[in-house]
Amino acid sequence: MRLRLAGYWKSWAGNTRGVLLVIVAMLCWSVLDACNKHLMGLGITPRQVLFLQATVVLTMVAPWVLWTRGKVVSTRNPQMHMIRAAFIVGSGWCAAWAVAHLPLAEASAYLMTGSLFMLPLGVWLLAEKPHWMRWLGVGVGFAGVLAILRPGVGVFQWAGVVALLGALMEAMLGVVLKKYSANEHPVAVLVWSQVACWLTFGAMSSFALPTIPVALWGLLPVIGIASSGIYMAYFFAYRAGDASAVEAGSFSMLLFSPALGYLVFCETPEVTFWLGAGLLVCGIALVITEPKG
C-alpha cells in the first residue's frame, strides 16, 4: 500500500508535488504564527518566543539524534548551514516582530511575498529560466503588496516593511536550500537551523525561557510540530520542483491566516487587504503558469 501511494505521488509533476508541499508548509506556518501571536499577547517578547520555539523543536528531535548517535545531523556542507543560520535568524525575527505588530492575516500576506522574491533570485542564483508570464505575475503580486501597504495615505505600516524584509530572507533561505542541500538529511537542516536560533535568541534572552501559564502548555507540542513541519515541507518541495514555481503554494496562507485570525483573535481584514490579497493571489497564479510552446 505504501509503495502504491509513493508511486502515485511520484507520478505527479514535480512542480505540482512541490506546490502541495508548500501548501502544507503554509498551514503549519499559519498555526505557528497564531500560537506565537497568542504568546506575545501575554507580554512575551518576540526573541523569547523564538528561543522557546527553538528549545521545543530541539527537545522533540533530540531522541532521534541520540538514537542515531548523531549520524542524522552529520553534514558534508557546514558552510550551507552557516549561511542558512544567518538568514533563518533574520527571517525568524522579522516574521515574529511583524506578527506581534500586525493583524495575523496582514502579516501573513507580506510574508508570503517570498514566492515573488524567489523569481528574480531563482534566475540570478539558480539559473532558472522562467516564462515571461512569471515576470508578469511578479508585477501584479507586488501591486497587491502596495495595495495592502497603502504608502502615502497616512496609515503606512513599518511593520509591513519588516515583514517584507523577512520574506526576502525567507526567499534566500529557499535558494540556499535548493542549491546546496541535495546530499543533506532533512533532519540535519532542521536541527542546525534551530541550533542557530537557539543560540542567537537564547543569548538575546539571557537563556531564560519565558513563563508559560499551565493552561497553555498544550501549545508547546503544537509549536514544535508546526515549526518542524514548515522545514520538512519546504525541504521536499524544493527538491521536487523549481523554487520559483513551487512557492506558488504560498497563496494558501491567505486562506489559513485570515481564518485563524478571525477565529482566535476576532480580527476582520479591511477591504484594502482583500484587494491587495486578490492581486497577490493573481500574481502568484501567473508565476506558476507554464504555457506550452
Image: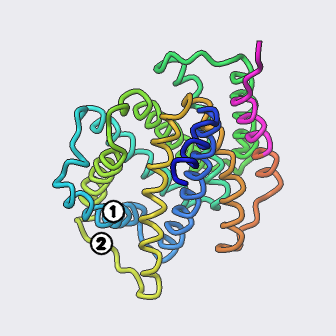
Residue 60 shown left or right of residue 166 in the figure: left
Which residue carries the number 2 mark? 209
Q: Residue at x 54, y 45 (%)?
A: 6
Where, quadrant-wise, is the N terminus in this rendering?
Answer: bottom right
Amino acid at pointer 2: Leu
Disc 1 secondary structure class? helix
**Residue 283 drawn in magenta:** yes
Majority secondary structure of magenta residues = helix
| Pointers 2 and 1 in contact (C-beta within 8 Å) | yes
Magenta stretch, residue numbers: 278-293
Task: Tell me the distance, in whole angstroms, between the alpha carbons under discs 2 and 1.
Answer: 7 Å
Determine crowd level at label 2: few under 14, some 14-19, many 20+ residues with C-alpha closer than 10 A.
some
Where, quadrant-wise, is the C terminus in this rendering?
Answer: top right
Residue 281 shown left or right of residue 22 in the figure: right
Q: Residue at x 70, y 52 (%)?
A: 254
Residue 197 shown left or right of residue 240 in the figure: left
**Residue 284 drawn in magenta:** yes
Which residue carries the number 1 mark? 51
Amino acid at pointer 1: Phe
Q: Nearer the viewer, residue 64 or 272?
A: 64
